[in-house]
Amino acid sequence: MSQDMTTNADVTDGKTHFGYQTVAADQKEAMVAKVFDSVAAKYDIMNDVMSLGIHRLWKRYTIDMAGARKGMQVLDLAGGTGDLTAKFSRIVGPTGKVVLSDINPSMLEVGKDKLRDQGLVQNIEYVEANAEDLPFADDQFDIVTMAFGLRNVTNKDNALASIYRVLKPGGRLLVLEFSKPTNPGLAKVYDAYSFHLLPKMGELVANDAESYQYLAESIRMHPDQDTLAQMMRDAGFDSVDYTNLTGGIVALHKGFKF
Amino acid sequence: MLWRQFLAECLSLGTNHVLNLEPDQRKAFASLSGHSLQIVLLPIEFPIALYFSDKAIDVQLPPEPLVDDALDCTVKVALSALDKIRDTSQLTALIKADKLDIQGDLGILQKLNTAMQQLSLNWESVLIPVFGETLTSQLLNFHEARLAEFTQHVEAVQITLAEGLIEEKKLIAPAIFVADFCDEVSQIRIDTDRLQARITRLEQQRKTNGE
Protein backbone atom coordinates (compact mmCIF):
# COMPACT_ATOMS: atom_id res chain seq x y z
CA MET A 1 0.00 0.00 0.00
CA SER A 2 1.28 3.45 -0.86
CA GLN A 3 2.29 5.38 2.19
CA ASP A 4 2.07 8.77 0.53
CA MET A 5 -1.60 9.33 -0.12
CA THR A 6 -1.70 13.04 0.64
CA THR A 7 -4.88 14.78 -0.46
CA ASN A 8 -6.91 17.78 0.58
CA ALA A 9 -10.20 16.44 -0.73
CA ASP A 10 -11.63 15.51 2.66
CA VAL A 11 -15.13 14.55 1.59
CA THR A 12 -16.02 13.22 -1.88
CA ASP A 13 -19.50 11.83 -2.69
CA GLY A 14 -20.24 11.55 1.01
CA LYS A 15 -17.11 9.45 1.58
CA THR A 16 -13.94 10.29 3.48
CA HIS A 17 -10.87 8.51 4.79
CA PHE A 18 -10.31 6.94 8.17
CA GLY A 19 -6.63 6.07 8.08
CA TYR A 20 -6.31 4.14 4.81
CA GLN A 21 -9.96 3.04 4.83
CA THR A 22 -12.70 4.85 2.93
CA VAL A 23 -15.75 5.34 5.11
CA ALA A 24 -19.02 7.31 5.04
CA ALA A 25 -18.27 10.90 6.06
CA ASP A 26 -20.88 10.88 8.80
CA GLN A 27 -19.25 7.83 10.40
CA LYS A 28 -15.72 9.20 10.75
CA GLU A 29 -16.45 11.34 13.79
CA ALA A 30 -17.67 8.35 15.78
CA MET A 31 -14.77 6.18 14.60
CA VAL A 32 -12.20 8.81 15.63
CA ALA A 33 -14.02 9.22 18.94
CA LYS A 34 -13.67 5.47 19.55
CA VAL A 35 -9.91 5.66 18.94
CA PHE A 36 -9.45 8.52 21.39
CA ASP A 37 -11.78 6.98 24.00
CA SER A 38 -9.46 4.01 23.85
CA VAL A 39 -6.17 5.90 24.15
CA ALA A 40 -7.24 8.81 26.45
CA ALA A 41 -6.04 7.32 29.73
CA LYS A 42 -2.55 6.61 28.45
CA TYR A 43 -2.33 9.38 25.86
CA ASP A 44 0.39 11.38 27.64
CA ILE A 45 2.55 8.35 28.38
CA MET A 46 2.26 7.16 24.80
CA ASN A 47 3.15 10.61 23.46
CA ASP A 48 6.35 10.56 25.50
CA VAL A 49 7.18 7.00 24.50
CA MET A 50 6.37 7.41 20.80
CA SER A 51 8.18 10.71 20.31
CA LEU A 52 10.96 10.10 22.86
CA GLY A 53 9.69 13.22 24.62
CA ILE A 54 10.24 15.46 21.59
CA HIS A 55 6.53 16.36 21.44
CA ARG A 56 7.20 18.57 24.48
CA LEU A 57 9.75 20.58 22.46
CA TRP A 58 7.38 20.87 19.46
CA LYS A 59 4.69 22.21 21.79
CA ARG A 60 7.12 24.62 23.43
CA TYR A 61 8.09 25.90 19.99
CA THR A 62 4.39 26.47 19.25
CA ILE A 63 4.05 28.48 22.48
CA ASP A 64 7.13 30.55 21.58
CA MET A 65 5.67 31.34 18.15
CA ALA A 66 2.18 32.13 19.49
CA GLY A 67 3.15 35.55 20.87
CA ALA A 68 0.78 35.15 23.81
CA ARG A 69 0.83 37.76 26.54
CA LYS A 70 -1.04 38.49 29.74
CA GLY A 71 -4.73 39.28 29.32
CA MET A 72 -5.17 37.44 26.00
CA GLN A 73 -8.01 35.08 25.05
CA VAL A 74 -6.67 31.75 23.74
CA LEU A 75 -8.51 28.76 22.26
CA ASP A 76 -6.64 25.45 22.50
CA LEU A 77 -8.61 23.46 19.96
CA ALA A 78 -8.51 19.66 20.04
CA GLY A 79 -6.43 20.38 23.12
CA GLY A 80 -6.70 16.83 24.44
CA THR A 81 -4.92 16.50 27.73
CA GLY A 82 -4.14 20.18 27.97
CA ASP A 83 -0.35 20.46 27.47
CA LEU A 84 -0.64 23.77 25.61
CA THR A 85 -3.46 25.00 27.84
CA ALA A 86 -1.30 24.62 30.96
CA LYS A 87 1.41 26.86 29.52
CA PHE A 88 -1.01 29.40 28.03
CA SER A 89 -2.84 29.58 31.35
CA ARG A 90 0.32 30.76 33.12
CA ILE A 91 1.23 33.17 30.31
CA VAL A 92 -2.13 34.97 29.99
CA GLY A 93 -2.45 35.14 33.78
CA PRO A 94 -5.56 35.94 35.81
CA THR A 95 -6.68 38.71 33.43
CA GLY A 96 -6.71 36.40 30.41
CA LYS A 97 -8.60 33.23 29.56
CA VAL A 98 -7.81 29.90 27.92
CA VAL A 99 -10.53 27.69 26.49
CA LEU A 100 -9.58 24.02 26.28
CA SER A 101 -11.81 22.48 23.66
CA ASP A 102 -12.02 18.92 22.37
CA ILE A 103 -14.69 16.93 20.58
CA ASN A 104 -13.93 13.93 22.76
CA PRO A 105 -15.29 14.03 26.33
CA SER A 106 -12.85 11.33 27.52
CA MET A 107 -9.84 13.39 26.45
CA LEU A 108 -11.37 16.54 27.91
CA GLU A 109 -11.94 14.81 31.23
CA VAL A 110 -8.31 13.61 31.38
CA GLY A 111 -7.17 17.16 30.55
CA LYS A 112 -9.44 18.67 33.20
CA ASP A 113 -8.10 16.33 35.90
CA LYS A 114 -4.50 16.96 34.88
CA LEU A 115 -4.83 20.75 34.91
CA ARG A 116 -6.64 20.73 38.26
CA ASP A 117 -3.81 18.61 39.68
CA GLN A 118 -1.40 21.30 38.49
CA GLY A 119 -3.42 23.92 40.36
CA LEU A 120 -4.58 25.60 37.15
CA VAL A 121 -8.25 26.43 37.59
CA GLN A 122 -8.96 30.14 37.65
CA ASN A 123 -8.59 31.14 33.99
CA ILE A 124 -9.43 27.91 32.13
CA GLU A 125 -12.78 26.99 30.59
CA TYR A 126 -13.59 23.53 29.20
CA VAL A 127 -15.79 23.21 26.12
CA GLU A 128 -16.75 20.03 24.28
CA ALA A 129 -16.94 21.18 20.67
CA ASN A 130 -16.61 20.10 17.07
CA ALA A 131 -13.90 22.14 15.32
CA GLU A 132 -16.09 22.31 12.20
CA ASP A 133 -18.81 24.18 14.04
CA LEU A 134 -17.31 26.09 16.96
CA PRO A 135 -19.83 27.31 19.56
CA PHE A 136 -18.11 30.67 20.10
CA ALA A 137 -18.91 34.23 19.10
CA ASP A 138 -17.28 35.85 16.08
CA ASP A 139 -13.94 37.65 16.67
CA GLN A 140 -13.50 36.23 20.19
CA PHE A 141 -9.95 34.87 20.39
CA ASP A 142 -6.49 36.42 20.01
CA ILE A 143 -4.87 33.04 19.40
CA VAL A 144 -6.19 29.65 18.29
CA THR A 145 -3.91 26.61 18.45
CA MET A 146 -4.57 23.12 17.19
CA ALA A 147 -1.90 20.58 18.05
CA PHE A 148 -2.14 17.12 16.49
CA GLY A 149 -5.89 17.51 15.97
CA LEU A 150 -6.58 18.74 12.44
CA ARG A 151 -5.82 15.42 10.75
CA ASN A 152 -8.69 13.79 12.67
CA VAL A 153 -11.25 16.35 11.52
CA THR A 154 -13.68 15.07 8.86
CA ASN A 155 -13.83 18.29 6.83
CA LYS A 156 -10.72 20.39 7.38
CA ASP A 157 -11.92 23.26 5.18
CA ASN A 158 -14.97 23.68 7.40
CA ALA A 159 -12.78 23.63 10.51
CA LEU A 160 -10.41 26.29 9.13
CA ALA A 161 -13.39 28.50 8.19
CA SER A 162 -14.85 28.07 11.66
CA ILE A 163 -11.52 28.97 13.30
CA TYR A 164 -11.20 32.03 11.05
CA ARG A 165 -14.63 33.20 12.20
CA VAL A 166 -13.83 33.04 15.94
CA LEU A 167 -10.43 34.76 15.62
CA LYS A 168 -10.23 38.50 16.30
CA PRO A 169 -8.85 40.64 13.47
CA GLY A 170 -5.08 40.57 14.07
CA GLY A 171 -5.39 37.16 15.70
CA ARG A 172 -3.36 34.14 14.65
CA LEU A 173 -3.89 30.44 14.10
CA LEU A 174 -1.12 27.94 14.81
CA VAL A 175 -1.51 24.38 13.54
CA LEU A 176 1.02 21.87 14.87
CA GLU A 177 0.62 18.63 12.99
CA PHE A 178 2.51 15.64 11.65
CA SER A 179 3.65 16.32 8.12
CA LYS A 180 5.93 15.01 5.40
CA PRO A 181 9.68 14.48 6.14
CA THR A 182 11.80 16.52 3.74
CA ASN A 183 14.69 14.05 3.65
CA PRO A 184 13.98 10.79 1.71
CA GLY A 185 16.30 8.82 4.01
CA LEU A 186 14.50 10.08 7.10
CA ALA A 187 11.14 9.36 5.44
CA LYS A 188 12.06 5.66 5.02
CA VAL A 189 13.18 5.33 8.65
CA TYR A 190 10.06 7.18 9.78
CA ASP A 191 7.78 4.90 7.72
CA ALA A 192 9.41 1.80 9.14
CA TYR A 193 9.01 3.21 12.66
CA SER A 194 5.36 4.25 12.15
CA PHE A 195 4.07 1.08 10.55
CA HIS A 196 6.12 -1.57 12.31
CA LEU A 197 7.31 -0.27 15.68
CA LEU A 198 4.51 2.17 16.61
CA PRO A 199 1.60 -0.35 16.63
CA LYS A 200 3.73 -2.77 18.68
CA MET A 201 4.52 -0.02 21.19
CA GLY A 202 0.79 0.81 21.30
CA GLU A 203 0.05 -2.83 22.09
CA LEU A 204 2.71 -3.00 24.80
CA VAL A 205 1.99 0.26 26.59
CA ALA A 206 -1.73 0.85 25.92
CA ASN A 207 -2.78 -2.68 24.90
CA ASP A 208 -4.23 -1.15 21.73
CA ALA A 209 -2.33 -1.77 18.48
CA GLU A 210 -5.29 -0.85 16.22
CA SER A 211 -5.61 2.70 17.47
CA TYR A 212 -1.92 3.35 16.92
CA GLN A 213 -2.11 1.79 13.48
CA TYR A 214 -4.86 4.35 12.73
CA LEU A 215 -2.66 7.17 14.08
CA ALA A 216 0.16 6.17 11.70
CA GLU A 217 -2.21 5.92 8.74
CA SER A 218 -3.98 9.20 9.51
CA ILE A 219 -0.60 10.96 9.55
CA ARG A 220 0.09 9.73 5.99
CA MET A 221 -3.34 10.86 4.81
CA HIS A 222 -2.90 14.36 6.20
CA PRO A 223 -2.10 17.12 3.67
CA ASP A 224 1.60 17.93 3.25
CA GLN A 225 3.11 21.28 4.24
CA ASP A 226 2.34 23.23 1.07
CA THR A 227 -1.15 21.78 0.67
CA LEU A 228 -2.13 22.73 4.21
CA ALA A 229 -0.66 26.22 3.75
CA GLN A 230 -2.81 26.67 0.64
CA MET A 231 -5.90 25.39 2.49
CA MET A 232 -5.29 28.06 5.15
CA ARG A 233 -4.97 30.76 2.48
CA ASP A 234 -8.21 29.51 0.87
CA ALA A 235 -9.93 29.84 4.26
CA GLY A 236 -8.95 33.52 4.33
CA PHE A 237 -5.78 33.51 6.40
CA ASP A 238 -3.02 35.97 5.50
CA SER A 239 0.77 35.80 5.84
CA VAL A 240 0.58 32.01 6.00
CA ASP A 241 3.88 30.24 6.49
CA TYR A 242 5.18 27.06 8.06
CA THR A 243 8.27 25.77 9.85
CA ASN A 244 9.43 22.18 9.53
CA LEU A 245 10.44 20.61 12.83
CA THR A 246 12.58 17.49 13.20
CA GLY A 247 13.14 17.20 9.46
CA GLY A 248 9.49 17.79 8.54
CA ILE A 249 8.09 14.95 10.66
CA VAL A 250 6.09 17.75 12.20
CA ALA A 251 5.30 21.20 10.80
CA LEU A 252 3.99 24.32 12.50
CA HIS A 253 1.71 26.35 10.22
CA LYS A 254 0.91 29.91 11.12
CA GLY A 255 -1.62 32.28 9.61
CA PHE A 256 -3.20 35.62 10.54
CA LYS A 257 -6.67 37.07 10.25
CA PHE A 258 -6.38 40.73 9.26
CA MET B 1 16.77 24.46 16.07
CA LEU B 2 14.89 23.23 19.12
CA TRP B 3 17.83 23.76 21.50
CA ARG B 4 16.11 26.69 23.24
CA GLN B 5 13.02 24.59 23.87
CA PHE B 6 15.18 21.68 25.09
CA LEU B 7 17.05 23.93 27.50
CA ALA B 8 13.79 25.51 28.71
CA GLU B 9 12.24 22.08 29.30
CA CYS B 10 15.31 20.93 31.26
CA LEU B 11 15.29 24.12 33.35
CA SER B 12 11.56 23.79 34.06
CA LEU B 13 11.80 20.11 35.00
CA GLY B 14 14.93 20.64 37.11
CA THR B 15 13.58 23.69 38.95
CA ASN B 16 10.24 22.11 39.76
CA HIS B 17 11.82 18.80 40.76
CA VAL B 18 14.09 20.55 43.25
CA LEU B 19 11.28 22.74 44.62
CA ASN B 20 9.00 19.73 45.05
CA LEU B 21 11.53 17.93 47.24
CA GLU B 22 10.64 20.10 50.22
CA PRO B 23 7.23 21.77 50.66
CA ASP B 24 8.82 24.79 52.41
CA GLN B 25 10.78 25.63 49.27
CA ARG B 26 7.56 25.68 47.25
CA LYS B 27 5.92 27.95 49.86
CA ALA B 28 8.71 30.49 49.39
CA PHE B 29 7.39 31.12 45.88
CA ALA B 30 3.68 31.19 46.83
CA SER B 31 3.50 34.99 46.77
CA LEU B 32 4.59 34.96 43.11
CA SER B 33 1.73 32.74 41.96
CA GLY B 34 -0.09 34.20 38.95
CA HIS B 35 2.80 36.56 38.16
CA SER B 36 5.36 36.58 35.38
CA LEU B 37 8.87 37.97 35.11
CA GLN B 38 11.32 38.31 32.24
CA ILE B 39 15.06 38.60 32.76
CA VAL B 40 16.99 39.82 29.71
CA LEU B 41 20.74 39.26 29.94
CA LEU B 42 22.78 42.09 28.40
CA PRO B 43 24.60 42.69 26.15
CA ILE B 44 23.64 39.38 24.45
CA GLU B 45 19.88 40.17 24.76
CA PHE B 46 19.13 36.63 25.97
CA PRO B 47 15.60 36.47 27.46
CA ILE B 48 14.47 34.14 30.24
CA ALA B 49 10.74 34.27 30.99
CA LEU B 50 9.42 32.86 34.27
CA TYR B 51 5.72 32.12 34.80
CA PHE B 52 4.71 31.30 38.37
CA SER B 53 1.67 29.29 39.45
CA ASP B 54 0.66 27.53 42.67
CA LYS B 55 2.37 24.27 41.85
CA ALA B 56 4.99 25.02 39.22
CA ILE B 57 7.36 27.53 37.71
CA ASP B 58 7.45 27.44 33.92
CA VAL B 59 10.69 28.59 32.32
CA GLN B 60 10.59 29.80 28.71
CA LEU B 61 13.46 30.94 26.53
CA PRO B 62 11.79 32.91 23.73
CA PRO B 63 13.80 33.59 20.56
CA GLU B 64 13.86 37.32 21.31
CA PRO B 65 12.96 39.49 24.31
CA LEU B 66 9.19 39.78 24.83
CA VAL B 67 7.66 43.24 24.79
CA ASP B 68 7.60 44.81 28.25
CA ASP B 69 3.82 44.67 28.73
CA ALA B 70 3.65 40.94 27.87
CA LEU B 71 4.67 40.16 31.45
CA ASP B 72 4.28 41.74 34.88
CA CYS B 73 7.94 42.76 35.11
CA THR B 74 10.90 42.91 32.73
CA VAL B 75 14.41 43.16 34.14
CA LYS B 76 17.26 43.93 31.75
CA VAL B 77 20.53 43.29 33.51
CA ALA B 78 24.18 43.20 32.46
CA LEU B 79 25.77 39.77 32.92
CA SER B 80 28.44 41.36 35.13
CA ALA B 81 25.73 42.66 37.49
CA LEU B 82 23.61 39.52 37.61
CA ASP B 83 24.76 38.45 41.09
CA LYS B 84 24.28 41.97 42.44
CA ILE B 85 20.56 42.27 41.75
CA ARG B 86 19.91 39.92 44.67
CA ASP B 87 20.92 42.81 46.92
CA THR B 88 18.02 45.28 46.62
CA SER B 89 20.08 48.07 48.21
CA GLN B 90 22.29 48.09 45.09
CA LEU B 91 19.48 48.43 42.54
CA THR B 92 19.62 52.23 42.28
CA ALA B 93 23.40 52.20 41.84
CA LEU B 94 23.09 49.57 39.10
CA ILE B 95 20.39 51.57 37.29
CA LYS B 96 22.55 54.70 37.43
CA ALA B 97 25.49 52.71 36.05
CA ASP B 98 23.28 51.59 33.10
CA LYS B 99 23.65 47.97 34.16
CA LEU B 100 20.02 47.48 35.11
CA ASP B 101 16.66 48.53 33.70
CA ILE B 102 13.35 47.53 35.26
CA GLN B 103 9.98 47.89 33.53
CA GLY B 104 6.70 46.98 35.24
CA ASP B 105 6.11 45.86 38.79
CA LEU B 106 9.36 46.08 40.79
CA GLY B 107 7.60 44.15 43.57
CA ILE B 108 7.84 40.95 41.50
CA LEU B 109 11.64 41.15 41.44
CA GLN B 110 11.71 41.87 45.18
CA LYS B 111 9.45 38.88 45.87
CA LEU B 112 11.70 36.66 43.74
CA ASN B 113 14.75 37.91 45.63
CA THR B 114 13.07 37.12 48.94
CA ALA B 115 12.08 33.63 47.73
CA MET B 116 15.61 32.93 46.46
CA GLN B 117 17.10 33.99 49.80
CA GLN B 118 14.79 31.56 51.61
CA LEU B 119 16.00 28.66 49.47
CA SER B 120 18.29 26.29 51.33
CA LEU B 121 19.09 23.41 49.06
CA ASN B 122 20.34 20.22 50.59
CA TRP B 123 22.09 18.64 47.61
CA GLU B 124 22.37 15.27 49.36
CA SER B 125 18.58 14.93 49.54
CA VAL B 126 18.35 16.00 45.89
CA LEU B 127 20.97 13.59 44.55
CA ILE B 128 20.53 10.49 46.72
CA PRO B 129 17.19 9.45 45.13
CA VAL B 130 18.83 9.70 41.70
CA PHE B 131 22.35 8.33 42.22
CA GLY B 132 22.19 6.45 45.54
CA GLU B 133 24.16 7.18 48.71
CA THR B 134 27.61 5.96 47.64
CA LEU B 135 27.72 7.70 44.29
CA THR B 136 26.23 10.88 45.76
CA SER B 137 28.89 10.94 48.47
CA GLN B 138 31.62 10.48 45.84
CA LEU B 139 30.08 13.14 43.60
CA LEU B 140 29.86 15.68 46.41
CA ASN B 141 33.43 14.90 47.58
CA PHE B 142 34.67 15.23 44.00
CA HIS B 143 32.79 18.51 43.61
CA GLU B 144 34.18 19.89 46.88
CA ALA B 145 37.73 18.88 45.96
CA ARG B 146 37.48 20.44 42.47
CA LEU B 147 35.85 23.56 43.92
CA ALA B 148 38.68 23.92 46.46
CA GLU B 149 41.25 23.44 43.69
CA PHE B 150 39.50 25.98 41.48
CA THR B 151 39.25 28.53 44.31
CA GLN B 152 42.95 28.02 45.10
CA HIS B 153 43.83 28.45 41.43
CA VAL B 154 41.79 31.64 41.14
CA GLU B 155 43.43 33.05 44.28
CA ALA B 156 46.89 32.20 42.89
CA VAL B 157 46.10 33.91 39.61
CA GLN B 158 44.78 36.95 41.47
CA ILE B 159 47.99 37.18 43.55
CA THR B 160 50.17 36.81 40.45
CA LEU B 161 48.25 39.48 38.62
CA ALA B 162 48.32 41.84 41.60
CA GLU B 163 52.09 41.38 42.07
CA GLY B 164 52.66 41.72 38.37
CA LEU B 165 50.77 44.96 38.27
CA ILE B 166 52.71 46.39 41.25
CA GLU B 167 56.12 45.36 39.84
CA GLU B 168 55.28 46.45 36.31
CA LYS B 169 54.10 49.79 37.59
CA LYS B 170 57.58 50.47 38.97
CA LEU B 171 59.06 49.95 35.52
CA ILE B 172 56.60 52.21 33.75
CA ALA B 173 58.20 55.57 32.87
CA PRO B 174 56.48 58.61 34.40
CA ALA B 175 54.58 60.82 31.97
CA ILE B 176 57.07 63.70 32.33
CA PHE B 177 59.95 61.44 31.23
CA VAL B 178 57.98 60.33 28.19
CA ALA B 179 57.21 63.98 27.31
CA ASP B 180 60.91 64.93 27.66
CA PHE B 181 61.90 61.97 25.51
CA CYS B 182 59.44 63.07 22.81
CA ASP B 183 60.86 66.61 22.91
CA GLU B 184 64.40 65.25 22.53
CA VAL B 185 63.39 63.11 19.58
CA SER B 186 61.76 66.14 17.93
CA GLN B 187 64.90 68.21 18.50
CA ILE B 188 67.11 65.50 16.97
CA ARG B 189 64.76 65.34 13.97
CA ILE B 190 65.03 69.13 13.49
CA ASP B 191 68.87 69.01 13.80
CA THR B 192 69.04 66.13 11.32
CA ASP B 193 66.90 68.04 8.81
CA ARG B 194 69.08 71.12 9.21
CA LEU B 195 72.27 69.06 8.68
CA GLN B 196 70.74 67.43 5.61
CA ALA B 197 69.91 70.84 4.16
CA ARG B 198 73.48 72.08 4.81
CA ILE B 199 75.01 69.02 3.12
CA THR B 200 72.78 69.52 0.09
CA ARG B 201 73.83 73.19 -0.13
CA LEU B 202 77.56 72.32 0.14
CA GLU B 203 77.20 69.70 -2.60
CA GLN B 204 75.57 72.28 -4.88
CA GLN B 205 78.43 74.82 -4.15
CA ARG B 206 81.04 72.17 -4.96
CA LYS B 207 79.37 71.37 -8.25
CA THR B 208 79.23 75.10 -9.12
CA ASN B 209 82.96 75.67 -8.23
CA GLY B 210 84.01 72.59 -10.18
CA GLU B 211 82.30 73.80 -13.33
Image: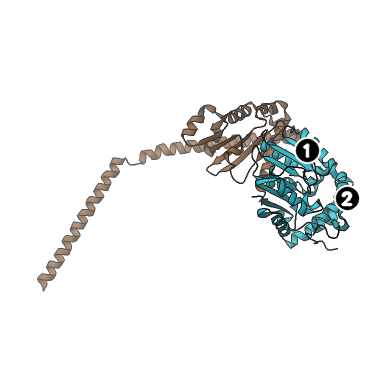
Chain colours: A cyan, B brown
Image quarter where the N terminus of chain A lies is: bottom right
* Label 1 in the same subunit as label 2: yes
Q: Which residue position is annotated with label 1?
A: A126
Residue in front for this viewpoint, A256 or A70: A256
Q: Residue at x 56, y 30 (%)?
A: B106
Q: Eyeballing the image, is A156 above or below B74?
A: below
* Amino acid residing under circle 2: Met
Around disc 2, counting alpha carbons within 10 Å, would you say few (fewer than 14), some (14 to 19), or many (20 or more)? some
Number of dots carrying numbers: 2
Q: Secondary structure at mark 1?
A: strand
Chain under callout 1:
A
Out of A26 and B1, give the one closest to the viewer: A26
Q: Residue B112's spot in the image, x, y percent?
A: 61, 30
Pointer 2 residue = A31
Q: In the figure, is residue A142 to the left or right of A10?
A: left
Compare residues B165 and A23 and report the one nearer the observer: A23
* Whole-number angstrom distance, CA of label 1 to CA of label 2: 23 Å
Q: Residue at x 71, y 49 (%)?
A: A164
Residue in the image at 76% along x and 60% along y: A187
Tell me if I can see residue B49 in this picture.
yes
